[in-house]
Image (cartoon, coloured by chain):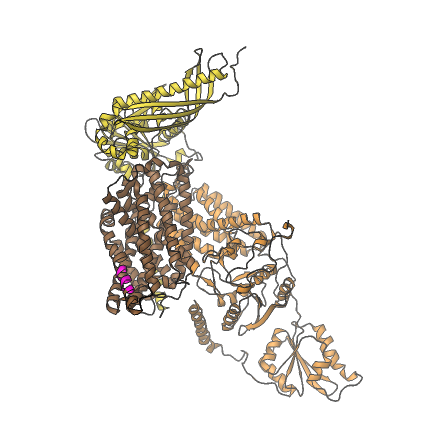
Amino acid sequence: MRINKRLYKIAICFLVIALLSGCGTSRELNELGIVIGVGIDKEEESDAVKITTQVVKPGQVSSGGKGGGGGEEAYANFEETGRTVFAAIRGIANKSSRKMYFPHNQVIIIGQNAAKDGVTKYLDFFMRDPETRLNVYLLVAKDTAAEVLETKSKLERVPGNSISLMLDSEANAASQAIDIRLRDFKESLQLKTVASVAPIIEVSEENGKKTATLNGTAVFKGDKMVGTLDKSEGRGLMWVLGKVKSGIIEVECSNGNLVALETVRAKGEFSSELVDGKVKIKVKISEEGNIGEDAGTEDISTLDEVAFLEQQNADVIKSEVMAAVKKAEELDADIFGFGESVHRKYPKEWTSMEDKWDEIFPTIEVEVEVEAKLRLMGRINAPSVPQ
Amino acid sequence: MKLEKGVITNTQLIYLILSFLESMVISINFSYGISKQDTWIAVLAAFVITIPIMLGYTAIAKSYPGKNLIQINDEALGPYVGKLFSALYIWFLFELMIHYAYFFNSFWITYIMTETPRLVFVAIFILVSAFAVWSGIETIARCSVIFTIIVSITVVFVISLLLKDMKIVHFLPILDLTPKDFIQSVHIILTIQFCDLIAFLMIFPYTKNNKAIRKPMLLALCLSTLMLLIVVLVNTAVMGVRITNTTSVSFAITREIDIGNVLTRLDVLVALTLLATVFMKVSVFYYTTVLGLAQLLGLRSYKPLIVPIGLIAIAISANLYPSDMEQVYAGRNIWPFNAMLFEIILPLITLITIALRNLFKDTGGENE
Amino acid sequence: MFNYIQKVIRYRKMTSSGGSGAKESPEAPKESSDELSEDLEANIQLIQGIIVESNDLNIRRFVIGKKVKAAIIYIDGLVDKTLVNETILKPLMYHSEMDSPPETVDIDYVESELLFVGGIDSKQKVNEAVNKILSGDTVFLMDGAAKALIIALRGWKMRGIEEPETEATVRGPREGFTETLRINTSMIRRKIKNPNLKFETLTVGDRTKTDVCIAYITDLAKPELIEEVKRRLNKIKTEAVLESGYIEQYIEDAPYSIFATVGNSEKPDKVAAKLLDGRVAIIIDGTPFVLTVPCVFIESFQSPEDYYSRFAFTSALRMIRFTAFFISILAPAIYVALSTFHQELIPTQLILSMAAAHEGVPFPSLVEATIMLLFFEILREAGVRLPRPIGQAVSIVGALVIGEAAVTAGLIGAPMVIVIAVTAVSSFTIPAQLDSGTIIRIVLLILAGFLGGFGIAIGMFALLIHMVNLESFGTPYLMPIAPFDKSGLKDSFIRAPLWTMLKRPKGMSMDDVKQKKPSGPPPFNEN
């Protein structure tokens, strides 16, 4: 029993010590600068990196906030340069009353210069730091990232939030800009032959107001940006990767009128084959869609017409894929991960090919097989014209 | 003279072993960097090698029913060698305890609370664990039932949320690594994950039916291997190549859960589950250390040893390695060989001695 | 654990013996073991020497058959005077008018032929007689008899059987126990018409001499359990027992624990159900609260109504109760841990609203939560003690002032008010754990405020270890969960249909009567 008492005493001592020292690490919500977007730019002249962080002002952004809004912005941007990302971020502490808090970061935007310089060194902090998350979206700015974070969104109060919502909705409606999260990017960076991609965001001016627009896809070789894909090439890439969720394909029907077909489901996969030491890739895409709009006057709901439209649809998909393949081969960047599939299927042969992949990739033969199906015609069958 | 009066049922023994082995989920991180996407094969291989070792352990326990490792050492190896062996084992159990405490705290301050001093965590952790040890093996065993259920639910929950992020291609190509790496990985899994079950040689005598320990032991081993295998498979399927340079995979994947922006950010749930598993592990090692030491020193109760051992453990564990880099290096390259001495070589000597004794004692008709 | 109790008892003994030196005053009943003599006046003197002169002590002297002097002694107000007159005085004093009175009248003759009363006992010791007088019995003494007849004609004003206010039910019997021991035992007997139902009475309390009755069913309750209950009751050394809480605190397994390991109820149906599980009930004179042992954690979540309603709904209710319990102990702690340590776990939109609400709040979250909890407890305490109409006014003022004004003034964030309100409402769903819940909540809150999620986890581990370690009269406190018992789970987080619950709770009843007698599917399911 005496020992019991002693244990209690020691326990209480420890608790007190522990509680006292633990208390210093807590942070109240109003001490945090909640970062929603980060921009990474490389300075033109020097090697320094310029970090832009977009911090929310909670009092302004909350819908329930009393007297919120007014003319005041709901966010503040902080800029700081440094030789390393971390140093620049901590440098912001000299300008901000609150500590930068990254777990709620939505987007990382990399400026064109930084992207061409090689991104690994800029992104290491965001992969290593315990606070940052790998679920954050990664984009490349057509010009500088700081500029993108300065744009005004017409609907949202914080640009960073707007960009991430834009990527979400774009993926479900158009599937022309690939949505890449940091974790996908990390994976492709770690695979030797796979070329990484990221969507491009540019600043466009409308009525004197700057807005951010998604436009195309950036292609990286290693960690350096080497080129871009346009919108349809971007979708070509997404067909192959099976990332298309929805999208509109415009085809001509048999008498030349435009018809818009909506993709509802799509599956894409590819396999590699070694024939006489030469790599052959077979891409197989199966797509299901609906008739979304008929710009002509003919009834296109006949079986013959549907078969024709399905063929047209398949051809468009095939051409988009081939365009993407062509562009990739031009850039000598294996954005699809063809090399990785060879690696998985032929691990022995791969050892000799791995180092020569740059030479092999532009020469590989790609065979695309598309199966497109139309399912629904909508609320009307023939267009509303006098028959 | 029995130091522990509590009795646990054989079903509780299964749960105790299960919750004891569940912390493999974190300690498997040592292997990912070496055997990459083939870690699951290494797990299977290690499991196959473990079975005969486990049979050896149970054979030792069965030849002296109702006696724990320290008493067996005395009887089988004589008072001097036996005492030496016992001291070595106790040191090993103590080492395991402080390593797990250090190991978990590394994880915690890397991911959850980066600014809190290590000593605070170790101190509180060991303190609560001391409370469990104080309450005896019965309490630990009863807690293990609850912990096992909680951990299993969490594992199933997390896996079901990650289903959409899994890619089968991440396993390919199979066996794309050098034999040396594979053997190293198997060795690590064998010594770090499985064979620290030697601690249970201290606990077997307190089971209700201490002659029938082989079945619960193997059953628990199979179940926990199954769980480990599932976790490794899920981790690999989600992480792919990123698995090689992530420090705490099982935890990192839960940060990637994102179901419609609602079921997201579940890290702490998993972190607390991991805390529960390590807590069980540290408690079992703590308990066996003090129990063994009390037996070695011929005390009437193990309770007076709880506080001093705990204080020493806190002091050592808070400063065990100068850096995490060193800890990972040791975990991969030094510890497996250190552990092999205690987990394989010493029990083997004991087992052979027992076998020889039986051979000379009787006409040789009986074995084991 | 027993050492603990022994220690406590020893400690009690020490303090009571230490203090008794000063208390050894003449007014204390002398523990004399004098025998009654054959002299009536001497006996009356003896009794008067023990019971101080008090005007409710009534000594009525009279003569039987014109020659034998006799007396009855009783306390005014504790006996039914009409009955005393009718059944004692009348027959004895009319005795001489009888047709053929015997030559000599001795006490046995009085007992066997003259008294018209059911309950008669005889005592030789003065002390025993005095105790009986004080308990409300009437003592009959007569010249030439060295013993007293104890005539049970108790009768006093008592509260009628009412619906208990502490355990209101929608469906189920409305009666509740009263302050009178006999009425309480009769209510249990009416529920269980079983010859094996046994009541045993002890007296506890040196001064109050309170009757304590142990009830159990002999072929269900474990003999060890009954022995243990008796042993602990007999070991109680205390001056006064005014309520069952006194007994509870003396016989608990772990007096320092925050959990009660003795159950109590005001409802006969609940107590009867516990007796049928093989538990032992302790009924104390003077209080409507009946104790039942062993008492396990899960009982706090079981209401007698659960068994009267349909099982699916009850099962849902059970889960709601468990959820509510966890909310009530964890909600403030989790809120504080999330908002000061793990902000990364809050969904982005939510953290923005929370941050907006916390903008300009002068206190840290921990202080905010502690203040609110404190206010809540004060409000509750104020409401409980006041008469009901004022109590309502208090809660309205409290809710308005704290909820509305504090948020408008920017002293407290609105989310914190919501969290505390949810906690408060949840805590009322499990009345049995209201006291322990309050303590756990505050401890966890402090741990969370200093150590975040780690603190909560460590607190919960310690709590779990403590609860697992706890026993109530030999039954583990977390019974169907740890140690795990599959059949017990049917009546824990869910309530299985009655006909599937074939076994009594494990570890309480005797092993050979585990099976409940009428078992099987409901009779209409036979096809």
**Name of the residue lying farthest toward the right:** C99
Answer whether residue B351 is magenta in the image.
Answer: yes
Res. A164 image quadrant: top left
Horizontal side of residue A224 vs B230, given as left or right:
left
Q: Which of the chains is yellow?
A: A
Q: Which residues are magenta?
A: B347-355
Q: Which of the chains is brown?
A: B
Vertical position of residue A363 compared to residue C474: above or below? above
Q: Which of the chains is orange?
A: C
Answer whether residue C451 is magenta in the image.
Answer: no
Res. B283 image quadrant: bottom left
x 27%, y 56%: residue: B344
Residue C515: image x %, image y %? Answer: 56, 60
The one nearer the camera, A90 or C229, is: C229
Horizontal side of residue C286 vs A175, given as left or right:
right
Vertical position of residue C466 compared to residue B363: above or below? above
Can see residue C450?
no
Can see residue B38?
yes
x 48%, y 43%: residue: C404
Residue A358: image x %, image y %? Answer: 23, 27
